[in-house]
Structures are given as structure tokens and as C-alpha cells.
Amino acid sequence: MKSLRPLAAVALIVFLYLLPIVHIPLLDSEDFDFPSLLFYPIGIFVLLAIGLYVTIGLAGLLNLGHVAFFAVGAYTMGLCNTLLGWPYFAVLPLAVAVSMVFGVLIAAPTLRLRGDYLAIATLGFGQVIQIFLTNAPGLGGVRGISGIAPPTSIGPLVFGVLDPVPFVWLVLTLILIAYFIVRRLESTHIGRGWNAIRADEDVAELMGVPTYRLKILAFAIGAGIAGAAGATYATKASFISPETFDLSLIILLIAALTIGGTRSLTGAIVGTLLVAYLPERFREFGDLRMLLFAAVLVLMVIFRPQGLFGRRLPREAESGSEVVENVKGEAHGTA
Amino acid sequence: MAPPDVSPVLLRIERIGVQFGGIVALDGVDLDIREREIVGVIGPNGAGKTTLFNVVTGVAKPSSGNISLLGHAITGLRQHVITARGIARTFQNIRLFEDMTVRENVMLGADCGRRDGSPGALLGLSHTRRNEAEARARTSEMLAFTGLTRHAGTLARNLSYGDQRRLELARALATRPKLLLIDEPAAGFNPTEKQELAELIRSVRAFGCGVLLIEHDINIVTGICDRIAVLNFGRKIADGTPCEITADPAVIKAYLGTPDAA
Ligand SMILES: Nc1ncnc2c1ncn2[C@@H]1O[C@H](COP(=O)(O)OP(=O)(O)OP(=O)(O)O)[C@@H](O)[C@H]1O
Ligand SMILES: [Mg+2]
């Protein structure tokens, strides 16, 4: 079983790279261009969700300012490209770095806060960034920045306006890199520290976990991934405006994480795939699909609060003594 | 095992005072713990025993006084730094990471004081790989020591009460403490369990660490402690060998109570 896993992973990766060029009947539809959809919203949202998973899922920090880091990455790309003429691949690391700096700047003062206060502070930060982008001189106001160039070609791979496939491969590559980074960190003392912070920050600190430093790290990594998503979105869209970085996006992402299960990276990704793809697929149902989406979300929260891929019941769900008895019984069985 | 009177002072608590609003929880408490010494802290409910642990671990801020570990001041240091310097604790009300396995709980303690950060973890540098291997080895050792090896994969929340208490010990010991603070480990235990636990605590000395033990069961305390300090209303009213303490009139008065002390 173990020896099959690398093979399965390779097969999955090959499949993902083929996805934009093969025609899969049920996934495709007359209404849309499937490869375009794979880039945005699907690919970009998945990248954003991986970043959000680090702060919310791993470190347990309810970060509602995530979209602002997405915006910082996009505007870094937009400004550096249109004003300085720097190509995408040169700006990408810079966009990641600038977003990380913003991540640390917002995290340093707010991470002394906990729970609801942190959520409100980060939410405020998201709003401030959007207002700043609308009003600051040189950023184009509500009209934003246009004429952002696509990446320069890599050999036979040409990033043109008409062909979304190379962009899908680009975002897929970034997703795989982000996935690898997060999985790697998760499996070491960094991940254990985040887990402990999420479970009980006070005890974590007393057991030697540098909680403040690790929380900042979670913010920086989450922001960096969002920044990469922003730069990549900007280079494909060629046009960005404050509207793209609206509050509704963070709500959608959190819904996606909730559906997939905030405590599992696979869950976060699958949840985002569903949330990004299904509404497009069932466009013919019009507004009804939003109602359906809301209904599914409510049902999930009631019947499967840990999400599709959630690992185990949260504490609250076990407060009924019956359930506790069952759990204890199981423990005896396995002992 | 004679009280190691000649070994150097491990922890020095000097004139420590702690106040919560108007409540004086600790008032000018002095206490020395020597290396490898097991010191008991006893006293009635609300005497300030847990507060003493809190102030040593940096959870409560002292309003006066100093604490030093091997001659270095630790007052005012961040809690995880104090732990990394070599002071670990258990909790009176068990506070495990309930949704983590037994092994993960201990592993977290074993990670204490690691200096390798995210780059090492990301790139799989040899430094990080070595530290991970060391943490795993330390974890296995602690699980074996506390007899929890067969529960390694169990979620902490599903352990029996007694095993949860043992896991608290294993997690704290995994941090490689020089001083281990144990807060009422035998609460709710039957006599056999208490005996086993006493043996376990006594054998902790094999790891080279000193112990500060809060315990209400006087038999355990007199059985394993080299010295006992008695707190009452935030003040230290006695400090001596188990024989001296059990014969001390002030202690007897505090414990049995008199109409005006109650
Ligand atoms: N965080 C706190 N805020 C306010 N008062 C506190 C706090 N912690 C302790 N106290 C008070 O300080 C006093 C000493 O409490 P402490 O918990 O140290 O007692 P203890 O000796 O451990 O008692 P027990 O044997 O019941 O555990 C008590 O009066 C308690 O109410
Ligand atoms: Mg107490």
C-alpha cells in the first residue's frame, strides 16, 4: 500500500496537468471555457485556500484579512510591470516578499489579540487595504491598473491572451509548490507547534512553543501564498481593480474551508474546488444555485461540522454524555 | 538517597510576592531547591501553592522578589523561554492537547528548545532531520518511562484519568527539564495508583532533574521528598525535612486548624 502512494501521486499530478487539454464530457459545458475556469476561479482560489489553511486550519487564527494579501500581490505585479516593465517571473518573488512583509506587519500588533478580536482586526485590515487601493494616488482609483503583461514565454510555452492552458499549468505549478511547502512544515515541529497553539495556546507556550513567533510565521506564509496568487491573477487578467478584492471573496473562501474541513489540507482544497466550480457548472439555474449553496452550507454545519475531510469531532459536538460514553467505550476496545 | 545538601542551588526563589487585585496570593516567599532534590510543597486549599508554580513558570507576574535558575534570573522571561531554560510543569487540572495522540503530546514537549526553524523544515536540512529523530527518540523514551507506549496512538482525550496524569508527566519530562514542577499528581488516585506514582516521581531523579511537588497526600510527600515547604495564606510557615515538618507545631495548627485560623 505504502509503495503505491508515490505512484498514485505522480498519476494524479499528470492527470492535473492534462486536465486543461483533454475534454472531459461531464466537467465541460457549453456555457463556459473549461480551461479558463480552471485558472480563475478554480486555480487561484485553491492557491488562496492553501494560504488561508495555514493561518486558520493549522495555527487556528481566524484571519479575515487574507484577501488583502491577494490584493498586495496583484498590485505589486501591476505596478512593477506597468511602471517599471518588469516581467512576471521577476515580480513573482517580489510580490510574495511584499505580501509576506504585509503579513508580518498586520500580524505583529494583532496577534496579541485572540479569537473574535483577531477576526475583527484582520477584517478591518482587509477593508482598509481596499479603501487604500481605491483612494491612494497612482493606483488608478476604482479603475485600477490595466495593461499588465502576460509572462514571457518559456521555450515553446507561450503565454498568450487567447490560450489559457499555459496559465493553468502555471497556477497548478504554484499550487503544487505551496502544497509541498505546507505539507512539509505540517510534518515537523513547526506543524506540531501550530497544532498546539490552535488547541491551547497557553499550554503550548508553557511547553516551550514560541507561540508568538509561530503565529507570525503562519501569517507570513499564508500571506506569501496569497501574494503569489495575486501576481499570477494580475498577469493573466491584465487588469485589476479594488473590486476584485472584495469582502465577499473571504466569505467564499471560508465557506470552502468549512465545507472541506478546516483541519485538513486535502479538505481545504476539495472544498474550494467545489465552491469555485459548482456555481459555474450550474449557471443555468441562475440565482437558485446560490440558495442551494447556502442550504448545503447550513446542512454541513449541522450534520458534519468537521467538514468533508475533517479528522474528528470537535469538542463541542461531544458535550452530550452519550457520545462521551461511546468514545470511552471505543478506547477500551482498542486498548 | 541522602538529601543532597551539598549540591548547588538549582532554583532560588527570593521574597516572592504575588497579588491578584486585593488578594495577596504569595507574600515574601523564599525557597531554595538544590540539584536533584525533591521538595514538597504542602498547605491548605488556597494557600498559594499553584500560584507559586505560576510565578516560577512566568504565568503570574510577581509584584516583588526574584527567581533564578542556576544563578541566572528568570523573572520576566517569556514562558517558553523559561521552559527552554529547564523548568517544566504539569497542571492541577489536566491540560493535555486532547485531540492529539499521546505520542504527539509528548513529541511537542520534546520539541522544546529547538533552534531550527522553517527553512530547515522546508528543505529537509540535516540539522532538522537530526532534531526530528532526536525528538522521536526522546518521545519513545518518555513513553516507556511512564508506561504509555502501548497507548502511543490513542487520542489524549480517550485515555483513562490515571494515564492522562502520567501523560502530563511524560510531556513535561520530554522538555528535558532541570526542574520539574508537579501539581497534585495523585488527586483522585486509589492507594495502589498513588504508590506507583510515588515510585515514578522518585525515579524522575534518574534524569538528573530536581522536583517541586505539590501534593495533599501527606504519605506521598513524606515518603519521597527530601524537604518539605509549608505554605499558609501565601506565607511560608515552615521548611525542613519530613520529620521536622510533621513535628512542627505551626504546621499542625495550620492543618488541623484553630477557630481563628479557619
Ligand atoms: N488568576 C487568579 N486571579 C485571581 N485570584 C487568583 C488567581 N489564581 C489564584 N488566585 C487566588 O490566589 C489564592 C491562592 O490560590 P492557589 O491556586 O495558588 O492555591 P493552592 O494552594 O494551589 O490551592 P489548592 O490546594 O486548592 O489548589 C487563592 O485565594 C486564589 O483564589
Ligand atoms: Mg493548586
Image (cartoon, coloured by chain):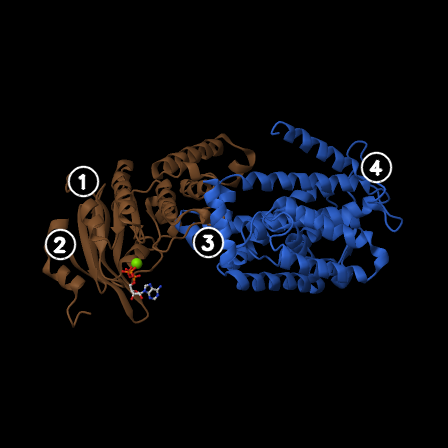
Chain colours: A blue, B brown
Mark 3: amino acid: Asp
Q: Quadrant of residue A22?
A: top right
Residue at (70, 53) in percent of width and height: A75
The residues bearing labels 1 and 3 have C-alpha atoms spaced at a distance of 37 Å
* Residue ranking furthest to the right: A30
Dot 1: element: loop
Dot 2: element: helix
Mark 1 chain: B
Left or right, A235 with respect to B48, comes to right
Mark whose residue sits in front, 2 or 4 = 2
Dot 3: element: loop
Mark 2: amino acid: Thr
Kindly identify which residue carries mark 2: B246
Residue at (14, 59) in percent of width and height: B251
Residue A24: x and y in percent read 83, 40
Kindly identify which residue carries mark 4: A22
The mark nearer the N terminus, 1 or 2, is 1
Dot 4: element: loop
Residue at (59, 54) in percent of width and height: A102
* Quadrant of image for the C terminus of chain A: top left
Q: Are marks 1 and 3 in contact (CB under 8 Å)?
A: no
Mark 1: amino acid: Ser
4 and 3 marks on the same chain: yes
The residues bearing labels 3 and 2 have C-alpha atoms spaced at a distance of 39 Å
Mark 4 chain: A
